[in-house]
Image (tube, rainbow, N blue to C red):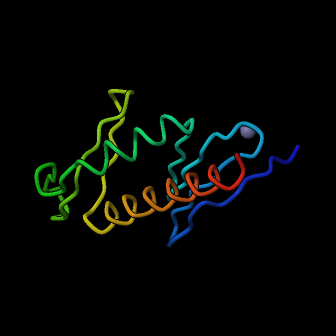
Amino acid sequence: MKNTTTVLTQRDNLCIEQCSCCDNIHLMYQNLLLKFTPESFADFESALSKLEFEKRAVTFGDGSDKMLINTPQKEIQLCFTKSEFELLRESLKEALLMIEVSQILYC
Ligand SMILES: [Zn+2]
């Protein structure tokens, strides 16, 4: 069965879409797929918007600086370069705005 989804934002290889049957939000980025409820998505956006790259960045063995983000699964951390993090943050903000606009239009 095919689910219907609405693309909220798509840039480079990052896509955020919302499922029309359950309103859940899927964030796809490279080989990562994160699933959120509208509430947990708003919390994620708000938490990320407060993080500062410079404070959380770690230099990796290949010389690149990446910031770490903890997940509820302690074995799994997400890591992003500064430009990847900015792309993620802007996309989250854009997707949230799209959700808010559609709530105003259709509710
Ligand atoms: Zn659904």
**79 to the left or right of 88:** left
The residue shown at (55%, 52%) is 100
Quadrant of the image where one finds ligand 1? top right
Find the residue positioned furthest to the right. Answer: 1
Q: Nearer the viewer, residue 49 or 75?
A: 49
Find the residue positioned furthest to the bottom. Answer: 12
Image position, residue 59 (x, y; %): 13, 56
The residue shown at (48%, 62%) is 94
Position of 40 relative to 79 (above/below):
above
Position of 80 relative to 44 (above/below):
below
Image position, residue 69 (x, y; %): 29, 43
Image position, residue 103 (x, y; %): 63, 49
**28 to the left or right of 45:** right
Image position, residue 39 (x, y; %): 51, 35
The residue shown at (50%, 49%) is 32
**52 to the left or right of 83:** left
Q: Nearer the viewer, residue 22 or 80?
A: 22
Quadrant location, the C terminus: top right
Quadrant assignment, res 10? bottom right
**71 to the left or right of 104:** left
Quadrant location, the N terminus: top right
The residue shown at (18%, 61%) is 65
